Image (cartoon, helix red, strand yellow):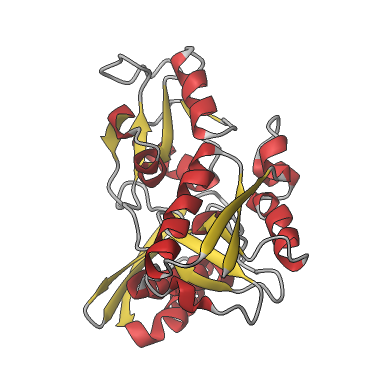
Amino acid sequence: MKIRVGSRDSRLAVIQSEIVMESIRRQNPDAEVDLVTMKTTGDLILDRTLDKVGGKGLFVKELDRALLDGRVDLTVHSYKDMPMELAPGLPVVAVSRREDPRDVLVLPEGSASFDGSKPIGCSSLRRTIQLRELFPGVEIKPVRGNVQTRLNKLDSGEYGALVLALAGLRRLSLEHRVGRVFSTEELLPAACQGILAVQAREGFDASVLDGFHDKDAWIVSQAERSFVRTLDGGCSSPVAAYAEVDGGTLRLTGMYVDEAGKAWKETCKAEISRAEEAGRELAESMKSRVKHGT
């Protein structure tokens, strides 16, 4: 059995794909698992923020095409980077156990404290809105490129700090660069932050991924993506959601930003069997409450 795994060619994307490939090999010792890397449109356009050029869906189009053309059998993504509406015929067939979902403040190499006279590098509207409450008066400036490119810009003095996902830094063995870990109350994570998603063509035998797939991560991803989808929130939207599973109970917190730019947060609980419904209902409730000022 031969399985070709498609990935962006960034260091982090390759590491994440190798996590999936190693799991397949452990469960299927006779499988021949090969990596196929490619650049995506999102990797090539670095002079504009993603909301100006089509959103983070630009990171998956080439990989989707490779799946549809039969050049690869699986593709691996950071689930938070995937559009809310997937390409027809290309379902997510497995998700990873969730890595730490929190965001972190990264300081220049050798710095012990944040220099507020320089901007914080951050291209996410979700993070930007919440950072303005945490660091009033500090400039939030867009920054693009892979993690290493961003760190180079930080260390050269262009920024006073960066805000990045802890999960990515851990996978890159760069956890030593973390200056502060934000709680999920301070910075509500992006939907599915810390979760890897594996996509395949419809009909693919996903049993090769049984040892990789995590049921709790699947449940929370359904709730979080349902919340964001209901609010028409794409990957460049300030909408955010974070869910946790405790036994048979799901706890979901959502963030909705009104037309004036004010962030509203609300939490609900539901049975895990109603994860997708809970996300939709919380979104609809929040949208209605914000509209009527309650």
286 or 27: nearer the viewer: 27
Q: Position of residue 20 (x, y in %)?
A: 45, 59
For residue 124, above or below residue 238: above
Q: Position of residue 261 (x, y in %)?
A: 53, 49
284 or 97: nearer the viewer: 97
Q: Residue at x 62, y 61 (%)?
A: 83
Q: Position of residue 35 (x, y in %)?
A: 58, 51
Q: Residue at x 28, y 19 (%)?
A: 113
Quadrant of the rendered image containing residue 99: bottom left
Q: Residue at x 47, y 73 (%)?
A: 208
Say whether residue 180 is visible: yes
255 or 215: nearer the viewer: 215
281 or 160: nearer the viewer: 160
Where's the C terminus, which quadrant?
bottom left
Q: Is residue 261 left or right of residue 184?
A: right
Where's the N terminus, which quadrant?
bottom right
